Structure formats: C-alpha cells, structure tokens
Amino acid sequence: MERILLYVHFNKYKRVSNHVFYQLEQLRPLFSKILFISNSHIEEATKKKLQDEFGISNLLERDNQGYDFAAWRDGMSAVGFEELKNYDSLTLMNDTCFGPLWDLEPIYKRFEADTQVDFWGMTNFRKTKYFEEHLQSYFVTFKQQILRAISFQEFWTKVKDFTDVQDVIDHYETKFTQYFTGAGFTYQALFDTRLEEVADLIHPDFTYYKPFTILEKEVPFLKVKAISGNPFSARYLLEEIKGRTSYPVSLISEHIFDYVGPDVPCLLQDKQLSKDDKNDSPEKPVALHIHVTDLQVFEQFKEKWEDLSLQYQFVVTTADEEIFAQLLGIISNRYQVLLGKEENSMQAMLEQSDLLQKFAFVGHISTVNLVDRIPQLDNAMRRELMEMMFENANASIKALEQDGKLGLVIPDLPSLVRYGLFEQKTYRKEMATIWQELHCQKTFDFEQYPVFTRVYGGFLWFKPSALIRLFQNDYQLSAQTEPQVLESLLVYLAWDQDYDFKIMSGTPLPALLDLQREAEQLIQQKGKLAHESLAKKVRRYLSNLFKS
C-alpha cells in the first residue's frame, strides 16, 4: 500500500522532543512518504537529524497561523492534490500524543480491508448540545476514494488561517466529520466512545478524562494532556504503560519535565536522593558557603560541617563587623572569612559569585532566623535542615557528579511544614517579576501553578551552572521584595537551564499525617466560609433594619 503521512509539529521552545523522534521512527516503515510540517522554527541541526536518522527530507516550516488544519492544508498544497490522488491513503497527524503504544500495522490492514469505511480515526468525541459527534483530528486517515473526490479538495482549500484556536475547533475540528459524511462517505473510530458510559464525565472526551480506558481499549496513542492534565493519576498511567507495552516511558517523563514543570506530581517518586552506602568523599573541591548572622548558632552547628572531608572548603560571609572579628578568632585555616554588605543569606552568596563559580559544586547554609517569634521551633527546623544537609553531603555531591542533568539537591519538607506549624506565603507576582527580569527562556505560569517547591532557608547543594541566571546577573532583590522569594524560585531557575533536582530524605513521618493536616485545613476553611456567610447575613439584616 502506498501511504502518505502529513505530520504537524509545534514546540513553544522551537525544539523537537525525543518522544516525537521516537514516534517518527516507529511510523516511518508504514508510509511511502512523510511530510514533516512544523508550525514553529526548527534548527538546521534538527533538520539534518530528521533527514539523516529518520529519512525525512520533506519538511515544511511555517508560522502557527490557523494551527493544525491550516498546516495540513498547506501540506496538501505542497504535495499537490493531484499527487495525493495516487496514494492509497493519507494520514493526518499531530504531535500531541505519546506513542505508538501498540503496533499500527494491524490497525491499518483492518481498516484497509473494510470496504465500508472511507475514513477513520483513533477516537471520536460524542455528540453534545454544542456539536455533532466527530472523529478527533489528532489522527485521521482518508482512503483513496475520498482523496479523488472533489469535496476533499474543496474542504481543504477553504480552510482559513484563524488566529483563535476555538474558531478552528468550531469550524473544522467539530465539522469535518459531518462534512464528509454529508458528501456520501462513511467513517469509523478504532475506539467508538458512543458505546461507553459517560455519566461521570464533564465532557465526553475520553482522551482527557478516561486515559485508563484509552489504554484498556489499546488505542495506540495517549494524548499528552492525559498526563499533564491528570498529574496525580499520571504515575499510575505510566506504570500501566510500562506494564502493558514496550513504549519507553522515560520519554513521557522527559517531555513532562521539559514542557510542564520540574516538580509535576508524577515525577516526584524519582526525585528521591539515593543513599550512598560507601559515603565516598568528593573527587573535586566543594565550596560550602555559610552566611553568619548569629555567632551562637554558627558555633552550635560548627562540628557538623567540620566532620566533612578536607575536599570541602568553607566560605564564610557576614555583614556584621563584630561577628567578622570574632569569626577570625575561632576558625581554622579551612575557612575563608569575608566581610560583605548583604544581610540576606542568598544575596550574600551571590555577592561571592566570582569565587563560588570556580568550584564545580557548592553548598549553601546560613544562621538566619527561619521561624519568627518562637525560638524553639526555629532551632528545631534549622537542626533538621542541618542534619539533612550533612548526612547527605557526600551522596548529594556524588549524584551531582554522576548525573549531568542534575543541578540541585534540596532537603525534603521539614517536619514543621508537614505539621502545619510553619507559616508559608506564596510570592506569585514577585516570582513572575524576577523571572522576567532574569530573561528566563522557558514560560511558566506562576499565577496558575498550584504549589511551589521551596528550598527552605536556601539550604542546598548545587552546580553553579544550574543557577547561572542568578550568578551571572549578580541579581539584586528590590527593597520591597521579601528574601524568601528566591527560595521559592531556585528549583525553577535550574529547570530553566534544563537541570533537574533531587530531594534528600528527611525525618520519616507517616503519610497519615498529611491526610490529617489536609482534613484539618478543610474544616478550618469551612469554618471560615461559614463565619463569612454569617457576617454577610448580619450586615444584610442590619442594613434592612436601618432602611425600615
């Protein structure tokens, strides 16, 4: 059979994801010709890779005007409608799916042998009050009898370059199936969702709301949004795919990390730092930056870092002249003590950026106050963070040495946070402002992101290159910005440079604690809402009373 594929690609970072390369590799044997249509710019090296490794020399690069349907239109024009008539089938596909999870050849042969089917797709969207039932356009195949029909060319040549994706959905996505059935053609979906129960669905979109059913029915493609839109069940989807198919699930995790975020729930299980039984010392020198605002706290924990091997070199900073003088009298030659200008510990670290960037790996701790007004809790939180930092120091550096993509190793949530005793603020606007000021390359919606991974106290081990945005810019927080903002940004700044993070194990606490905290928060929220409702009723009553 002579088959042709028009494959539409779009990437907001102007890259081609590895899951797309894998997809093309699996699709290549099925088709006589593949036209790769990119709605975003492609680097010359990527074009060469597509040709050399995947045999795809037919590329069409265009602006993302009109989205997929306009891209397919332009692809058909590039091939030529007369040329298309010579193929036994034309498949339209985009890169919004992972897969193929199962072999496509038997599916093609099944539909090619069925003379009652003129065009077919993977899944259909059931009829609603807004539109008719239709095939979903991420994968649709038209047989030769449609390709040779006048109606086929008429439909595609009339596709407009809509700038609003909803217009594309309203005019083409939800209409093309009815258009071709109106022209006398018949269709079928590999998985006909009209036969399924949908009472529990907000919308009858099985590709989003029922991804486990998609796998159960052995649909060979799983939408990316099924993973990104279901972050807590996604881990089980990955396990199901791994157990039932030969698809490399690492491609899914990699794509979610690159394009959704570094701390999506389905990725967290793999973030745990492995224990190092050998506890070998680092091969290269490591700088431990210690910012001192309280000499008593410094002396309290001094033995912990001095127990580290001689590969660890201590860079101590303070903005207090009296503390500086006292430090000089109590430290050994393992220390380099510097009098700086910055009180804030993160800013003090950045003040020494030229020095710290000479090291392959850096640690950061401080004596700054972590919990306001309750010194006992402040000391407990600091002690726990210090224990995580130094019990896992060698393991952290070893992980940073061995994994080129690893940029940070951070402590797990301190117990105070899990018990709900640590007051946390969210700095969405401030984080977004700094993100823009640092000219970060990735897009990140700070307003919509549910929870941020915070590096408490700024305690961490890291590669300076992971935080290069801060070090190179010698970034200065404005006087109005609270210093904790940077603690909430570190993981994301590293991600912007394509670095991942690992988490040190903290104090083991039963997971039941988190469930109890969540239940208590819900009770408190209900009580607050009830109080606000009562207050409104009282105000309304008094207002009506005075009016009368």
Image (spheres, rainbow, N blue to C red):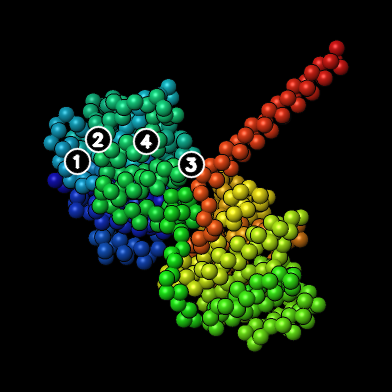
In the picture provided, is 460 more to the left or to the right than 344? left
Distance (Cα) linking label 4 and label 3: 30 Å
Q: Position of residue 198 (x, y in %)?
A: 37, 26
Identify the amino acid type marked 1: Ile
Which amino acid is tagged 4?
A: Lys
As helix, strand or loop, the secondary structure at mark 2 comes to strand
Q: Is residue 338 left or right of residue 419?
A: right
Label 1, label 3: how far apart the Cα atoms are: 35 Å
Of circles 2 and 3, the one toward us is: 2
- The circle drawn on residue 210 is 4
Mark with earlier residue (4, 1): 1
Q: Which residue is mark 1?
A: 107
**Residue at left offset 69%, top offset 68%:** 367
| Type of the residue with mark 3 | Thr
User: Residue placed at 76% from the left, 26% from the top?
Assistant: 535
Tell me the residue that label 3 is attached to: 163
Quarter of the image where one finds residue 56: bottom left
Q: Which numbered disc, 4 or 3, marks the residue closer to the eye?
A: 4
Q: Is residue 525 above or below residue 20?
A: above
Image quadrant in which the C terminus is located? top right
* Left or right, 453 with reference to 8: right
The circle drawn on residue 190 is 2
2 and 1 marks in contact (CB < 8 Å): yes
4 and 1 marks in contact (CB < 8 Å): no
- Residue 5 shows up from this direction: no
